[in-house]
Amino acid sequence: RENYPDAERQDVVKKINSLRTNFRKEYKRIQDAEKRGASAEDVEPSLWYFEEMKFLQIQETPTASISTMDVSEDVIDAVDDNEDRGGANKTCGCTVNDEPHQKNRKRSAPDPTEELVKLVSARLQQTQNDSDKVAAAWAVELRKMAPQQQLFAKKAINDILFEGQMGTLHRDSVEINVSHVSTP
């Protein structure tokens, strides 16, 4: 709500579906690369939020079945079409249950889309400070490095953080690629 004060539920659902689609495409790309023989280190996700969306991997894919909601809507459409043609007195060979199925809905497994909307809504309400944003960007860049380069970068970052916590960090604290050549 901070960034998009006029956002409505429909906007959030669209954004969530967009994020899910992008995640699935990226996940499929990684899976395909691994099937071709690439190692996990060779294939890095390009989405900065890929790790946060990994919970989507464990969701079961829906089985191919006909939704009772779709059947009900088809029956209602058929009845409406019949009435439009002047056949209101004709009997339809189907029954429409106007009674809501609230009890069954509560017993069934939670809707994954609804769960995702709740998770994203909670995530959007959390304020992300500048440090979190910078750290996320650094994490993306760090993943692009070779393993040995990652180690060097982590060591340098940890050394800088240590000096800062000790209060001894200053403008000239960091020297990168300085050659120590002795003069005769």
Image (cartoon, helix red, strand yellow):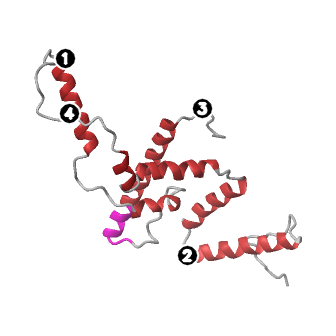
Residue displayed at 59% across by 66% down: 142
Q: Earlier in the sequence, mark 3 or mark 4?
A: 3
Q: Which residue is under mark 1?
A: 84
Instruction: Determine the image quadrant of residue 135.
Output: bottom right
> Gap in Å between the C-alphas at discs 3 and 4?
37 Å
Q: Which residue is under mark 4?
A: 75
Magenta residues?
Answer: 29-38
> Gap in Å between the C-alphas at discs 1 and 4?
14 Å
Instruction: Determine the image quadrant of residue 90.
Output: top left
Mark 2 vs mark 4: give the one in front: 4
* Amino acid, disc 1: Asp
> Gap in Å between the C-alphas at discs 2 and 3?
44 Å
Q: Earlier in the sequence, mark 2 or mark 3?
A: 3
Closest to the observer, 35 or 49: 49
Q: Give the x, y percent position of residue 184.
A: 85, 85
| Quarter of the image with the N terminus in it | top right
Q: Which residue is under mark 3?
A: 6
Mark 3 vs mark 4: give the one in front: 4
Closest to the observer, 93 or 22: 93
Mark 2 vs mark 1: give the one in front: 1
Q: Earlier in the sequence, mark 2 or mark 1?
A: 1
Q: Which residue is under mark 2?
A: 147
For the residues labelled 3 and 4, say whether their Cβ atoms are less than 8 Å apart: no
> Gap in Å between the C-alphas at discs 2 and 1?
69 Å
Q: Earlier in the sequence, mark 1 or mark 4?
A: 4
